Amino acid sequence: MNKQELKNKILEAKKATDTVILAHTYQEPDIIDIADVTGDSFFLSKKAAELKAKRVVMCGVRFMAESVKILSPETETILPVAAATCPMAEQIAPERVRKFKEENPDTEVVAYINTTAALKAECDVCVTSSSAIKIVKKLDADEILFIPDQHLGSFVQKSVPEKKLIFWDGYCPVHAQLTKEDVLKCKAEHPDAVFAVHPESPKEVVELADMVGATSEIISYAKAQKGKVIIGTERGVVDYLAINEENGDRFIQLAPEKLCCEDMKKITLEDVYKAIIGEGGEKIELDEDLRKKALKSINRMLELG
Ligand code: 13P
Ligand code: SF4
């Protein structure tokens, strides 16, 4: 079967089984092509809450599929490849957060959406990269434990100097590889380009940027520019812009050898097809108590963000 035939089979099976396919922008272009809804973490969370679909196949990483299940427990939620996980989401044991809260009852715990459901259940509120600053500003506490991404945390701290953020030593293994030298080299090759970067990148990289933002914000910014834009995030964003925008070659991938999230690329069209017809993938199941606790943190994020 060629690729187009497989895509057609996916579209038929999707319709026949009343399945909605969600896909994060970092997915391969072929997956984006067959998805019903695409976007960044915040957009997909909002959509999952609104959809109330019977079945969802979540093309992304495990925490994204868990977010769908937390928000829509009645929805049968399938992650097409069980091994597609975000390494950052598991960089803290939930028990350590619980212990921290017992010892520091006045400190609010803010968890990046890139965390397991078990971690979300221990925190006070979730944030995404596009909503973090807005939400942290609105919290009552003066002291905040920000988990797990130290780089996003330090980016937020800069915009919210009135609060004291305590960081964990977590990081995204993809964005954290970026160096100042990568940026300077790319800027030297494209001296007329502006530079947009994801806040999961190290501080010295963020400092060189003309714009810092989440996936959706980088896309909007890049579209609005007339000339070249260096994109400092996962290469799916450049693939997306190259396909959907005119003059696609004006979007320059920063450090292409580094900015590829292998976990985000694990899902293939075959995996999606098998997940839809019930022959593959993992059905997400969550303990109901844990789900309700995690839901509180996500709902607070949706209210404040
Ligand atoms: P967004 O919140 O921008 O979608 O990012 C998700 C992610 O995994 C970034 O590495
Ligand atoms: Fe996780 Fe980083 Fe991959 Fe995003 S790019 S899913 S934060 S490892």
Image (cartoon, grey):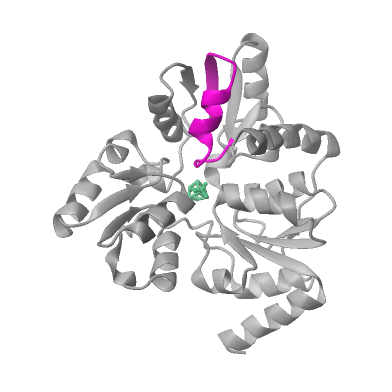
Q: Give left or right: position of 297 versus 230.
A: right
Q: Is residue 137 magenta?
A: yes
| 6 to 149, vertically: above or below | below
Q: Is residue 133 visible?
A: yes
Measured as percent of width and height from the top left, residue 26 is found at: 50, 59
Give the image quarter of residue 9. bottom right
Q: Give left or right: position of 159 versus 190.
A: right
| Image point (32%, 46%), residue name | 178
Measured as percent of width and height from the top left, residue 269 is found at: 61, 74
Quarter containing the N terminus:
bottom right
| 45 to 92, vertically: above or below | below
Quarter containing the C terminus:
top right
Compare residues 301 and 177 and report the one nearer the observer.
301
Measured as percent of width and height from the top left, residue 252 is found at: 29, 62
Give the image quarter of residue 16. bottom right
What stretch of residues is rendered in magenta?
127-145
Q: Give left or right: position of 151 versus 37.
A: left
Measured as percent of width and height from the top left, residue 233 is found at: 39, 52
Q: Is residue 62 visible?
A: no
| 287 to 270, vertically: above or below | above
Q: Is residue 133 magenta?
A: yes
Compare residues 138 and 176 and report the one nearer the observer.
138
| Image point (41%, 52%), residue name | 218
* Total numbered labels: 0
| Image point (48%, 34%), residue name | 149
| Image point (25%, 62%), residue name | 227
